[in-house]
């Protein structure tokens, strides 16, 4: 029994790591390392605060809510809670995260692809493969945990070990320690992993229940403990990879400060491994992108089926609709996606952090205030991000 328990934790932990680890997780740690330079320690602490610690808090919180994200958000009230849910789903779905995966994956792989496979053709291929892999929803976590995660870890390990064992001088940066910490903490938002753990948490708990439905020794609390341990394992693996990737950025990022984020991993990997690293690069990027878009597609399809269509659409049509929207929106390219999505993410992500902390405090210590802390966070966030809204005013004009 104990061996089965450990096996379940390891498999689910690897699956959570793989679900959260997408193409953005290759780009942003490198950027954090480049931005931090010789102030690496303070920069990586700020980055891990939002990229790893906050997702762990969100995961623990949703576990205490028994994987019910509606109950999690409805502590704000029915209407505000539903608005937050819709924003989160749109962000991790076709409007940004899933479309970004398609665009980033193509940008990184384009040096190794035939000219005929442009962004449109690539998006059709990737979304079709995602549909085939996600149509059998019950097989998603097994595919992620048993196949993709180990292969991804091996591919990344080759690059990280060789790069870190041959360090270059750290890039000197003039920004203050406070600016470094703040900027890398904001950069950590871009992973959207807090959203991922909240919505993937329900999938993990559901599959754990299915795996133990014939074993009466398990109850909800024990399942929650297993899910929590698996989540901590997955996030710990993320933290290791983030620190390693950030070190590569700090060691090899000199002169790449203005480089396209989607090309950073390819350029730095070539610096470390040379032309022979092309296969490793292609494998790591493809697996990271594919594993994450599979998990996101499953979550979004369920949301469209159960909430938006009120079960008028089946799971397969809902999945097809989500992937079709993802494919079309991805055609605008990574830069255009970021222009319109990042200001809104930077505004609303702090609300999600505040809600997650308040909900966890409510479950642990019966701390009841939630609406006022979230409202105050919203006011402060709007004030701090006001200048970035010019992009929306220009669009409306």
Image (cartoon, grey):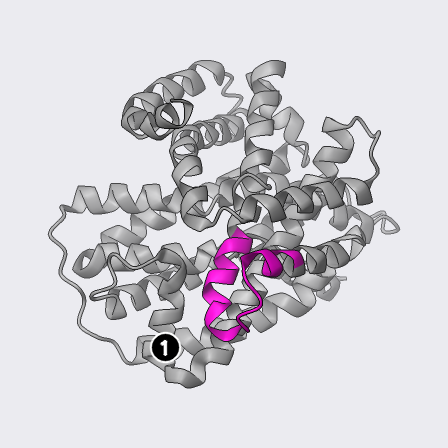
| Most common secondary structure along the magenta stretch | helix
Which residue is found at the position 67% from the left and 69% from the top? Answer: 147
The answer to whether residue 347 is magenta is no
Q: Secondary structure at mark 1?
A: helix
* Labels in figure, total: 1
Q: Whole-percent x and y of residue 113? A: 53, 72
* Residue 13 appears in the figure: no
Question: What residue sits 82% from the left and 34% below the top?
Answer: 313
Q: Is residue 103 visible?
A: yes
Asked if residue 50 lies left or right of residue 251, the reply is: right
Find the residue positioned furthest to the right.
214
> Circle 1 is placed at which residue position?
270
Which residue is more in the foreground, 297 or 21? 297
Relative height, residue 77 to residue 182 (above, below): above
Q: Return the x and y of residue 190 as percentages of the image width and height.
A: 42, 45
Quadrant assignment, res 385: top left
Q: Is residue 63 left or right of residue 33?
A: right
Residue found at x 31% / y 30%: 388
Residue 210, image x, y percentages? 82, 49
Looking at the image, is 121 positioned above or below residue 311?
Answer: below
- Residue farthest to the left, as pictured: 174
């Amino acid at each position: 029994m104990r061996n089965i328990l450990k096996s379940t934790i390891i498999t689910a932990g690897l699956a959570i790591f793989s679900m959260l680890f997408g193409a953005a997780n290759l780009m942003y740690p490198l950027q954090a390392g480049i931005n931090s330079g010789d102030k690496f320690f303070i920069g990586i602490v700020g980055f891990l605060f939002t990229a790893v610690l906050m997702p762990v808090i969100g995961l623990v919180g949703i576990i205490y809510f028994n994987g019910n994200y509606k109950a999690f958000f409805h502590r704000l009230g029915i209407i505000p809670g539903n608005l937050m849910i819709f924003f989160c789903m749109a962000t991790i779905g076709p409007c940004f995260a899933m479309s970004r995966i398609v665009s980033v994956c193509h940008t990184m792989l384009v040096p190794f692809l035939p000219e005929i496979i442009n962004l449109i053709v690539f998006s059709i291929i990737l979304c079709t493969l995602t549909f085939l892999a996600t149509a059998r929803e019950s097989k998603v976590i097994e595919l992620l945990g048993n196949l993709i995660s180990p292969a991804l870890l091996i591919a990344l390990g080759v690059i990280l070990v060789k790069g870190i064992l041959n360090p270059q001088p750290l890039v000197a940066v003039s920004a203050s320690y406070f600016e470094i910490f703040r900027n890398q903490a904001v950069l950590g938002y871009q992973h959207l992993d807090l959203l991922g753990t909240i919505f993937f948490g329900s999938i993990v708990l559901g599959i754990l229940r299915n795996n133990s439905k014939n074993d009466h020794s398990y109850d909800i609390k024990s399942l929650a403990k297993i899910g929590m341990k698996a989540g901590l394992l997955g996030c710990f693996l993320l933290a290791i990879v983030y620190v390693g990737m950030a070190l590569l950025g700090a060691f090899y990022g000199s002169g790449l400060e203005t480089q396209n984020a989607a090309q950073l991993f390819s350029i730095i990997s070539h610096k470390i491994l040379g032309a022979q690293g092309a296969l490793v690069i292609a494998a790591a990027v493809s697996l990271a992108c594919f594993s994450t878009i599979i998990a996101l597609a499953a979550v979004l399809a369920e949301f469209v089926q159960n909430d938006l269509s009120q079960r008028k659409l089946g799971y397969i049509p809902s999945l097809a609709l989500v992937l079709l929207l993802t494919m079309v929106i991805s055609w605008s390219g990574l830069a255009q996606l970021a222009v319109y999505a990042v200001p809104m993410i930077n505004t609303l992500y702090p609300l999600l952090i505040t809600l997650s902390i308040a909900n966890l405090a409510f479950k642990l210590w019966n701390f009841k205030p939630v609406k006022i802390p979230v409202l105050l966070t919203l006011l402060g966030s709007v004030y701090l991000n006001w200048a970035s809204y010019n992009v929306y005013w220009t669009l409306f004009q």
